[in-house]
Amino acid sequence: MPLTSNHLSAMYHRMWLIRCFDQSARELFMANALRGTTHTYIGQEGVAVGACAALRQDDYITSTHRGHGHCLAKGGDPRRMMAELLGRVDGYGKGKGGSMHIADLDLGILGANGIVGGGIALATGAAYSANVRGTDQVAVCFFGDGASNQGILMEAANMAALWNLPIIYLCEENQYAEFSPSRPFLAVERLELKAQAFGMPGVTVDGNSVLAVLEAMQAAVARARSGQGPTFLVAQTYRIEGHTVGDPLTYRSKEETALWKAPDRDPISRFGHLLVEAYGFSGGDLEALAQRARHDIEDAVAFAKASPEPSLSSLWEDVYA
Ligand SMILES: Cc1ncc(C[n+]2csc(CCOP(=O)(O)OP(=O)(O)O)c2C)c(N)n1
Ligand SMILES: [Mg+2]
């Protein structure tokens, strides 16, 4: 399907929405307005937006502890997300879950997850359920390069390949796992080589090129929808900020981060440049889309702050275990 300027505008706006959301989350955390902890997706926007642009609303995603970007890219409501971060009743989990527990089943968002690798079996189960029900829905499982070493991936991917399940295992190689570089903890030279052991195609894509991610996803989604089975997709990117907000970042150099923040690598700047050079957008068009995203997030923060905290008497409601 050819990309219209509406599609391109929506993708650019969505990338800014994610960036502004996480910049606000960071500011709120620093101002002690946000309890618990939070992990920003800044620098990785091309992965979630490119991936979700290849999906339908009824397709499934599972997310991670760094999940705001995935949720927004799949159409999550920034107001309800921000209210959840601030622990307010209008949040997705009525303010009791916080940043790492946001789900929206109507949009196929099966949940962020504080357990590293926790989404892998859930997404595989969702793909299995689509298969059993005979629908052509697909599932996308987002997880990190650190999570690619979790044992559950071997179990789930083996099953998915054996049963030709409609799933894409999308590994975000953001080069860090908590406070360590991920590379020294990987036995394979390239992450996509793990796909050989899983028995499925392995594809590596430039995760900071939103259109490259979209293209790779379209191929993987077409394969999954037509019953040909799973794909292991590696999106190479960079975690621009710390593991959590407040991380002193003593384990990596400022020079390295500056390289990835430069306009020729930052996924939003790169996409903006392409939109001007190849798709006839003006600088004013780009600024208007970024401005709309900033406004959307200011609105989300105001909505969240106006929402009350849950009452003490609701403490045991919606508690299942
Ligand atoms: C099962 C489990 N083990 C360890 C942790 C602690 N932990 C939280 S995030 C993280 C690193 C994850 O790295 P990666 O999968 O690369 O994701 P990224 O943070 O880079 O997005 C670890 C070890 C956890 N939350 N769950
Ligand atoms: Mg990582």
Image: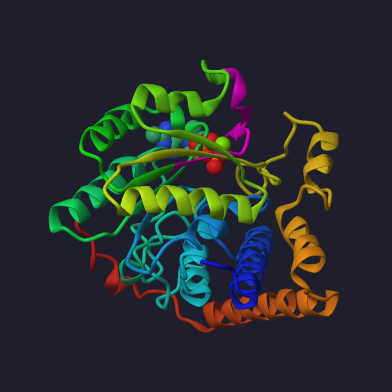
Above or below, 115 relative to 153: below
**Residue 164 relative to residue 262: left or right:** left
Q: Which of 270 and 292 is in front in this view?
A: 270
**85 shown above or below 238:** below
Q: Does the magenta stretch include residue 152?
A: no
Is 89 or 137 nearer to us in this picture? 137
Ligand 2: image quarter: top right
The location of residue 8, given as percent across then percent down, is 64, 70
Tell me if I can see residue 38 in this picture. Answer: no
Q: Where is residue 263 in the image (x, y as percent from the top left)?
A: 83, 53
Give the image location of residue 260, x and y in percent: 77, 43
Q: Does the magenta stretch include residue 181?
A: yes
Evaluate whether residue 82 shows in this view.
yes
Residue 114, percent across and down? 42, 46
Segment tinted magenta in the rendering:
170-184
Above/below status of 235 relative to 315: above
